[in-house]
């Protein structure tokens, strides 16, 4: 980072780094670490909760929690949200791989804000969690059915990966549209 002084006696200002962001040294590495911790932590939690659900839940005997507000009902979903596209499981798997490659290859190197690191980490955790199911679960490679086990009124059955994707979407909307913060940490110009 370079320091610039416009004229003798003028305050010293920080010049943007070559990547266009004013940051202390090592902050990008910390943001990448935060991203990795959130992504791997969310992925591991998703895999763990699905394993527990498969082991403990009977698809024909759902369990009610909190007075029926939450029902634990085990299903295996070959499609996307709302069970759409059930015969295109391999397409969802391929799209998931492309999304992960894009995020890790193009967006993570530009991280300049902790909110974006968490949001992208959650997105990768969710996409990765459902991709693990599509790769490793029956009926086979790239055709695996996603394990869903949480149900609330008026909403399709979901899992922790879906919760991560939804939380990421909300965070991205808040960061980009409400707070006007770009992925590199700068603010979008007003107007």
Image (cartoon, helix red, strand yellow):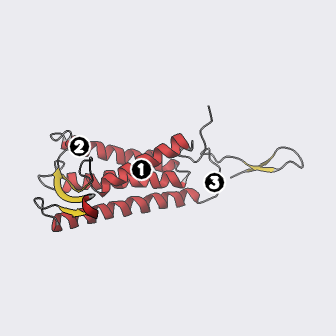
Q: Earlier in the sequence, mark 1 or mark 3?
A: 3
Q: Which residue is mark 2?
A: 82
User: Is 155 in front, or is 158?
Assistant: 155
**Element assignment for label 1:** helix
Residue 45 image offset from top left, x and y in percent: 32, 64
Q: Separation of disc 1 and disc 3 at Cα? A: 24 Å
Are circles 2 and 1 on residues that touch, CB within 8 Å? no
Residue 186: in sight, yes or no?
yes
Residue receiving disc 3: 23
Residue 190 left/right relative to 73: right
Tell me the element at label 2. helix
Query: Is residue 86 shown left or right of residue 105?
Result: left
Image location of residue 159, percent across then percent down: 27, 56
Give the class, few, some or many, for how many residues have Cα within 10 Å of label 3's Cα (few <14, many ≥20): some
Looking at the rendered image, the quarter that the C terminus falls into is top right
Query: Does residue 60 sit above or below 142 in this rendering?
Result: below
Mark 3 and mark 2: Cα distance apart in space? 43 Å
Quickly name the residue at label 1.
Answer: 168
Q: Position of residue 8 (x, y in %)?
A: 89, 47
Residue at figure coordinates x 12%, y 62% from the top left: 61
Neighbor class of circle 1 (other Cα within 10 Å; few <14, some 14-19, many 20+) is many
In front: label 2 or label 1: 2
Identify the mark nearer the N-term, 3 or 2. Answer: 3
Residue 80 in view of the camera: no
For the residues carrying marks 3 and 2, which lies nearer the camera in this image? 2
Of circles 1 and 3, the one toward us is 1
Measure how far apart labels 2 and 1 are at the Cα level. Answer: 19 Å
């Amino acid at each position: 980072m370079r320091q610039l002084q416009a004229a003798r006696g003028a305050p010293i200002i920080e010049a943007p780094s070559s990547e266009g962001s004013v940051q202390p040294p090592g902050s990008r590495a910390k943001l990448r670490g935060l991203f990795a911790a959130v992504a791997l932590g969310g992925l591991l939690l998703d895999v763990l909760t699905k394993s527990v659900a498969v082991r403990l839940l009977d698809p024909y005997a759902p369990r009610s929690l909190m007075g029926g507000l939450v029902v634990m009902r085990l299903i295996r979903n070959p499609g996307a949200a709302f069970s759409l596209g059930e015969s295109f499981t391999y397409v969802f798997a391929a799209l998931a791989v492309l999304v992960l490659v894009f995020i890790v290859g193009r967006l993570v190197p530009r991280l300049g804000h902790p909110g974006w690191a968490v949001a992208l980490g959650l997105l990768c955790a969710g996409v990765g969690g459902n991709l693990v199911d599509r790769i490793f679960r029956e009926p086979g490679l790239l055709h695996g059915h996603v394990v869903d086990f949480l149900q609330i009124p008026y909403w399709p059955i979901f899992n922790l990966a879906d919760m991560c994707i939804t939380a990421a979407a909300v965070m991205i909307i808040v960061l980009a549209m409400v707070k006007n913060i770009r992925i590199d940490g700068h603010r979008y110009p007003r107007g």
